[in-house]
Amino acid sequence: MSKLIRGLNFSQATSLNMIDMVGIGPFVTIPFIIHTMGGPQCILAWLLGALLSFMDAFVWSELGAKWPQAGGSYVFLQKLYGKKYGRMLSFLFVWQTSIQAPLVVASGSIGFAQYLTYLLPLTDIEQKMVSGSLVLLLVWILYRNIKTLGKLSVIMWVVVGSTILWLIASAFTHFDAQMAFSFPADAFDLKPMFFVALGQASVKSIYSYLGYYNVCHLGGEIINPQKNIPRSIFISIAGIAALYISMQIGILGVIPWQEAQNSTFIVSAFFEKLYGHATAQFATGLILFIAITSLFAVMLGYSRVPYAAARDGNFFKVFAKLHPTKNFPYISLLVLGGLAFCFSLLFKLKDVITAIIVMRILVQFISQSVGLIALHYRSKKLRLPYKMPLFPIPAILGIFVWLFVFLSSDWQYIVGALGIIVSGLILYFIKEHYTKTMSINN
């Protein structure tokens, strides 16, 4: 039987993480975050997103190093919660992923099409055509073996990192500190609405940080995963947090926040103000390339989740198929791409971003943290290739911040997330009843 190949080294794994994290996200969410917070205090949302990512990274690093297999959270939830509840939670995760993963890809493709309008005037229908075509292009790019994709990821990261460093260098050579830190009089008025705004803004910043765990979904293809998974996670977060925070402060030092909060093309406007329209067009082209690289990494990682579940008998068997010569889960990739194509034609960017975050908090992020804490206390002689410092403080802090973000979200997203969980539970028990009935009859 064909099996996955451990063909991704440390630099390739880290590159995949970073290009996953830096997609169209920061370039389209910066105006939302500034507007929601109402001034330069928006930097707090980026700091909170970085803090949460670091706290959650300790959990992912322990789990990824302990169980480096394809599927990431699917495997972790089974191991943490045992045969009965673990199987149920892992099914919920796959069910949620079958909706959420295509939404992630759709959000990037929609953002790509919207940003393209800086270069080309496009109608709404033409934007949908672009976003759908981009998804199809990505499926074609990913339809090859993991070693080729690993080499490609490093090249992509060089372009992504260079573009952001160019932006930051440009910002700080034209920096106006008085403009950057022109806080409104009520900027730090710590009333309930301040924290509601911080929570809602943090949903957008966290969306831009997502992807630091991508190597865990690819755990079965990482070389020396016990060391390379934790290292790639922490290096990715540290590097991207520094870039994001510097980028946000730098932009505020060039464009007044009152103007930046209403800018559809904030980074293009930034380069146009400094260097003129031609340079802004070139920079926009680089941003569009960054969007493609992120979606490349996202689709690569998520295509391994249904594959892992199917191999385990907890999802449709067809998803367990590997390509006969290239050894990658091509059915999973094609289905993910097909759903992403449909979603890219149906939804709006702002709604998709919030739904992506809120949908995942309970089943994936909080459940993993709670399960890991319980595992530590349940197994006193637990052997872990990587152990988080100051256990269980990072995991507990992460749980509280995730709950804060969840409860700060608009009610319709919370209801939607709970609805997906309930529908998943119904499907799970129907599936289990059918399986037992078939077993008895046979």
Image: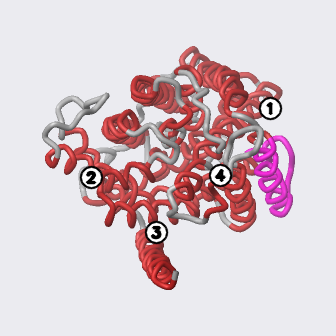
| Residue depicted at x 67% and y 33% | 146
Q: CA distance from mark 2 to mark 4?
A: 28 Å
In the image, taking residue 274 as reference, residue 423 lies left or right, namely left
Closest to the camera, between mark 4 and mark 1, is 4
Q: Earlier in the sequence, mark 1 or mark 3?
A: 1
Q: Which residue is mark 4?
A: 105
Q: Earlier in the sequence, mark 1 or mark 2?
A: 1
Closest to the camera, between mark 4 and mark 3, is 4
Amino acid beneath label 2 = Gly
- Asked which secondary structure carries label 3, the reply is helix
Pinpoint residue 302: horizontal percent, then vertical percent. Answer: 58, 49
Which sits in the foreground, 296 or 256?
Answer: 296
Closest to the camera, between mark 3 and mark 2, is 2
Q: CA distance from mark 1 to mark 2?
A: 48 Å
Amino acid beneath label 3 = Tyr
Q: Earlier in the sequence, mark 3 or mark 2?
A: 2
On residue 281, the disc is 1
Closest to the camera, between mark 2 and mark 4, is 2
- Asked which secondary structure carries label 1, the reply is helix
Q: Which residue is mark 3?
A: 413
Contact between marks 2 and 4 (CB within 8 A): the answer is: no
| Residue depicted at x 59% and y 19% | 165
Place residue 66 in its image quadrant.
Answer: top left
Q: Is residue 120 magenta?
A: yes
